[in-house]
Each structure stands twice: as structure tokens, then as C-alpha cells.
């Protein structure tokens, strides 16, 4: 078309003006639709992001963002229209018309350019698909990891009560009595350091029979958690030895602690930890006796192995801000109103905040990984659709441009299967080259996701093979319509103009 207009006397400035106008019109139409779509996308973005992005509720599709997006659409469309026009200016109009044939279809140079663009698009899409596949495998691996404690049918809420010790203890004991009596409640306990909340406090550790550390850098720091009796039953944590906490383990009695198996294995590898004494935050403090050992749990991060932990009796630790943890026989949210009512009955001034199930807390701890996975899956789906459309369009253009060649092949004896294999081979070579480039690109770019991955390597061969094979299979389906169209080319009709 550019060659015809140029041969008829249309100047380059006028041609550029026409191309720019057409591109600008397309950009404005598509951009206007995109602006309307943006509001829905922002809502969807907030829905899937959850707690992965702080202050996400403040994000809106403001005018500045919309203007930037519309401007980007205009620039992209104008560039896509002007670039071919500038390229056409360097060619001889008569040569272009001669190569284009009677139908005015694209020449070999144009098809090569489009093949290059489609190959790059395929490579980028495959890299996105590999990233999404790695994150999907990560989430599957995390789901298989035994946490070491129950997460189902457990309700938590933050309860803050700042009073003297006697009043503090009275509130918590009465609260446990009233909450435990609610129909449907199996266990109730207070805890500072509920799993996956990030709540614990560090303390330095010294062990009986070992020389005290002389330097601050030599001291061992461990996370402390404080719980009431029944906590381990509630959480489904197994007692491996010794005893659980008792309601009598309070401030006036000797300090006691329960350690996990990782603690016992590290600090008492050849001895029984129960009955041994430890000092927390210096030997000038009263010693604490280890009275029990529990199984390990991934309490800080589901992707990390259990580390040594120390549990104290909450009656001795006196944590003013802590969680009330409740295990129910059915949906824990069904007892939320009754629990809050009983707590208010004990003390109307107590601060009750952030009621959540432990499953919600677990999901929140994985929010960043879940969001990254959903984001990559979304971009991968969009990219795949665009790439498949591009492959289909390129092969359709190739068939239209080679109608004369295909007709001659048919006229000299080529069968339909030969024509199909010819076009199918062109599509396969295009897809294969893009996939190979995409795998190489994915191996490089997937290292960016290393911090999000769990129990899978960035260059995991299984993911690369599965994603590559599935994409090739789907892409070959996109080639089927152009291949069938090529096989049905009528030689007489195609050569009528020759």
C-alpha cells in the first residue's frame, strides 16, 4: 500500500501523517477501553494481593496513572505504525510491488521481520510461564510440608490487659474458664508467640554445666514463647517427654520451661534435657528448669526447618499483649461473637483485636509468594494468548503470501499432506526457536525468583520440560487453521492472475 501511494505521487510527509493518524486513532480507541478496564483490574489486583503489599487499600487508578498508561499506549501504537513506514521509504516502490505479487501481500523481508518479533514474543512468554510454573511448584511443595501443629478449626485474637499481676492473672484465668465453657469450644489457651505471627522475644541462653560466655558475641540468642496449660494439646503438638505446663506454674513458684526437640538435639545431643537448668538473659536471673520436651514445628516460616525454641509458662512470663487461641469442634468463626462477649464480661476495657483463624494467618505468611504466583500466572496467560494469536496471524500471512508458490507446488504434483507439512514445518521451526530462546531466558531470569522458591531450583529441568512441551503442543494447535487453509489452495484460482 505504501509503495502504491508513493508511486502515485504521495510524499513522505503526507504518508507519515496518514500513518500517524491511523495509529493514533487505534491507540485512543484501545486506550479508552483500557482506561475503563483499569478500574476493574485495580480491584482485582487488591483482591489477589491481600497482605502482600502494605497500604494496598490506598492504591487507586488516579489520573496520573491513567495518563501514563494512555500515553504509553499512544507511543506504542504510533511507533508500531511509523516504523514500517520509515522502513518502506528506503525501498524502491517498483521493487516492492513486483515482489508483493498481484494480491499485494507481504514480501520475504516483512515475513522475516514478523518471524523475529513472534520468536521474541514466544521467548518472553515462555520465560513468564516457567516463572509461574516454578512458583506453582513452590506452593505445592509448601502445602506438603508438615508444619508440626494443627491449623484447622483454630481461632486467634489479640487480647491486651495491662494491670497489676494479681489483676492480670485473675482476668486471664476467668477468661479461660468462661471461654472454655462456650458450646463448641474444645480448648482455650493464651499464648505469646502464635506460629507464623512473628511474635516472640529473643533472649540469651546459658546452660548448666557449660562455662558462661565472656563476650557478648559468644552468647546464644533464642526466641522465647510463653503459653498457658492446654496450649500444646490445642495445637496438636506432641509431648515427647516430661510434663506440660500447669496452672500452678506461676510467679511464686520455680521457673519452668518446655523446649522443642531441635533445642534438645542441639544442646543436649547425648543427654536428657529434662531436669536440666538454663539461664535466660544472664546468670544473675533465677535459673529455669526444663520440665518438658515437645515435637518440632515450623513456627516462624513454613519454608524453614524448625529451630531451637523455648516455651515459658505465661503465668510466669506475664505477657501483657498476647493471643487468645481457641480450638473448636466446627467452624471457629461461629463462636467469635460469643468469645468476645465472654471476654467483655470479665473486663469491658480489655483490648480485643485482629480475630483470625490460624489458616488465615498461614495464608498471610505466604501472601508474598501467593501474590507473585498469581501475578506471573496472569501475565503468562495474557502473554500466551497474544503469542498464540501472533503465531496464527504470521502463518496466515505466510499462507496468503505464498499462494502462488503453493499453487505451483500443487500443480506439479504436491499432495495436500505435502503442503500441510510445509506450512506445519514453518510453524514448528518458529515455535521451537522461540521455545529454546525462552528456556535460556527463563534460566537467567528465574534466578530473580530465588527468594520466593522453596524446594525447587530456578533451573528445575522438570518445570522447563513440562512448560516447554505444553506450550509447544498448544502453539501447534494454533497452526492448524492456517495449515488446513494452505492445503485447500486451488491451483487454478491462485494462478488465474499470472
Image (cartoon, rainbow, N blue to C red):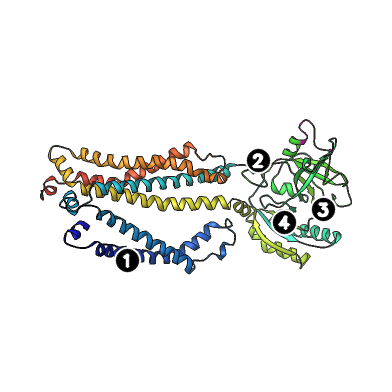
The residue beneath circle 4 is 323
The residue beneath circle 3 is 315
The label shown at residue 25 is: 1
Can residue 133 be seen in this snapshot? no
Sequence-earlier tag: 2 or 1? 1
Residue depth check, mark 4 versus mark 2: number of the one nearer the observer: 2
Above or below residue 71? Residue 473 is above
Callouts 3 and 1 close, C-beta under 8 Å: no
Span colored in magenta: 267-277
Q: Position of residue 488 (x, y in %)?
A: 19, 46
Q: Position of residue 219 (x, y in %)?
A: 79, 42
Q: CA distance from mark 3 to mark 1?
A: 73 Å
The label shown at residue 305 is: 2
Name the element at disc 3: helix
The majority secondary structure of the magenta stretch comes to loop
Q: CA distance from mark 2 to mark 1?
A: 58 Å
Q: Position of residue 221 (x, y in %)?
A: 76, 44
Residue sitting at x 17%, y 43%: 405
**Residue 93 as seen in the image, left or right of residue 134:** left
Residue sitting at x 45%, y 64%: 68
Above or below residue 67? Residue 302 is above
User: Within 10 Å of the Cα at label 1, are there few (<14), some (14-19), or many (20+) other Cα atoms?
Assistant: some
Nearer to the camera, 20 or 156: 20
Name the element at disc 2: loop
Above or below residue 131? Residue 40 is below
Q: CA distance from mark 3 to mark 2?
A: 29 Å
**Residue 18 as seen in the image, left or right of residue 140:** left
Sequence-earlier tag: 4 or 1? 1
Q: Position of residue 433 (x, y in %)?
A: 35, 40
Sequence-earlier tag: 4 or 2? 2
Quarter-wise, where is residue 334 in the image? bottom right
Sequence-earlier tag: 3 or 2? 2
Amino acid at each position: 500500500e505504501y509503495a502504491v501511494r508513493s508511486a502515485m505521487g504521495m510524499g513522505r510527509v503526507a504518508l507519515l501523517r496518514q500513518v500517524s493518524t491511523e495509529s493514533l486513532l487505534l491507540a485512543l480507541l484501545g486506550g479508552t477501553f483500557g482506561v475503563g478496564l483499569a478500574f476493574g483490574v485495580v480491584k482485582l489486583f487488591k483482591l489477589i494481593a491481600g497482605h502482600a503489599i502494605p497500604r494496598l487499600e490506598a492504591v487507586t487508578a488516579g489520573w496520573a496513572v491513567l495518563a501514563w498508561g494512555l500515553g504509553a499506549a499512544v507511543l506504542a501504537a504510533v511507533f508500531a505504525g511509523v516504523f514500517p513506514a520509515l522502513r518502506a521509504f528506503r525501498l524502491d516502490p517498483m521493487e516492492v510491488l513486483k515482489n508483493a505479487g498481484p494480491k499485494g501481500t507481504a514480501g520475504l523481508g516483512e515475513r522475516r521481520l514478523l518471524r523475529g518479533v513472534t520468536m521474541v514474543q514466544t521467548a518472553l512468554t515462555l520465560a513468564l510461564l516457567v516463572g509461574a510454573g516454578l512458583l506453582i511448584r513452590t506452593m505445592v511443595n509448601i502445602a506438603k510440608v508438615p508444619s508440626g501443629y494443627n491449623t484447622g478449626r483454630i481461632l486467634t485474637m489479640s487480647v491486651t490487659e495491662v494491670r497489676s499481676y494479681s489483676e492480670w492473672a485473675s482476668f486471664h484465668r476467668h477468661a479461660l474458664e468462661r471461654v472454655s465453657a462456650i458450646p463448641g469450644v474444645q480448648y482455650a489457651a493464651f499464648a505469646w508467640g502464635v506460629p507464623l505471627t512473628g511474635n516472640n522475644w529473643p533472649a540469651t541462653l546459658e546452660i548448666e554445666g557449660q562455662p558462661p560466655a565472656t563476650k557478648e558475641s559468644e552468647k546464644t540468642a533464642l526466641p522465647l514463647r510463653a503459653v498457658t496449660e492446654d496450649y500444646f494439646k490445642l495445637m496438636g503438638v506432641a509431648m515427647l517427654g516430661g510434663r506440660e505446663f500447669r496452672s500452678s506454674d506461676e510467679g511464686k513458684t520455680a521457673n519452668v520451661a518446655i523446649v522443642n526437640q531441635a533445642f534438645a538435639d542441639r544442646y543436649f545431643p547425648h543427654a536428657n534435657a529434662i531436669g536440666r537448668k538454663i539461664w535466660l538473659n544472664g546468670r544473675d536471673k533465677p535459673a529455669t528448669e526444663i520440665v518438658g520436651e515437645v515435637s518440632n514445628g515450623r513456627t516462624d516460616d513454613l519454608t524453614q526447618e524448625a529451630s531451637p525454641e523455648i516455651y515459658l509458662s505465661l503465668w510466669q512470663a506475664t505477657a501483657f499483649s498476647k493471643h487468645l487461641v481457641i480450638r473448636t469442634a466446627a467452624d471457629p468463626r461461629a463462636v467469635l461473637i460469643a468469645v468476645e462477649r465472654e471476654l467483655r464480661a470479665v473486663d469491658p476495657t480489655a483490648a480485643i483485636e485482629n480475630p483470625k483463624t490460624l489458616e488465615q494467618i498461614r495464608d498471610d505468611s505466604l501472601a508474598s509468594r501467593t501474590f507473585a504466583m498469581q501475578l506471573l500466572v496472569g501475565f503468562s496467560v495474557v502473554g500466551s494468548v497474544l503469542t498464540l494469536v501472533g503465531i496464527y496471524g504470521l502463518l496466515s500471512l505466510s499462507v496468503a503470501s505464498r499462494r502462488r508458490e503453493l499453487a505451483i507446488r500443487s500443480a506439479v504434483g504436491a499432495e495436500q499432506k505435502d503442503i500441510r507439512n510445509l506450512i506445519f514445518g514453518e510453524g514448528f521451526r518458529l515455535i521451537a526457536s522461540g521455545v529454546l530462546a525462552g528456556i535460556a531466558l527463563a534460566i537467567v531470569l528465574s534466578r530473580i525468583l530465588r527468594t520466593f522458591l522453596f524446594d525447587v531450583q530456578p533451573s528445575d529441568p522438570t518445570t522447563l520440560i513440562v512448560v516447554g512441551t505444553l506450550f509447544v503442543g498448544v502453539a501447534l494447535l494454533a497452526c492448524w487453521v492456517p495449515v488446513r487453509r494452505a492445503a485447500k489452495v486451488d491451483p487454478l484460482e491462485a494462478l488465474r492472475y499470472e
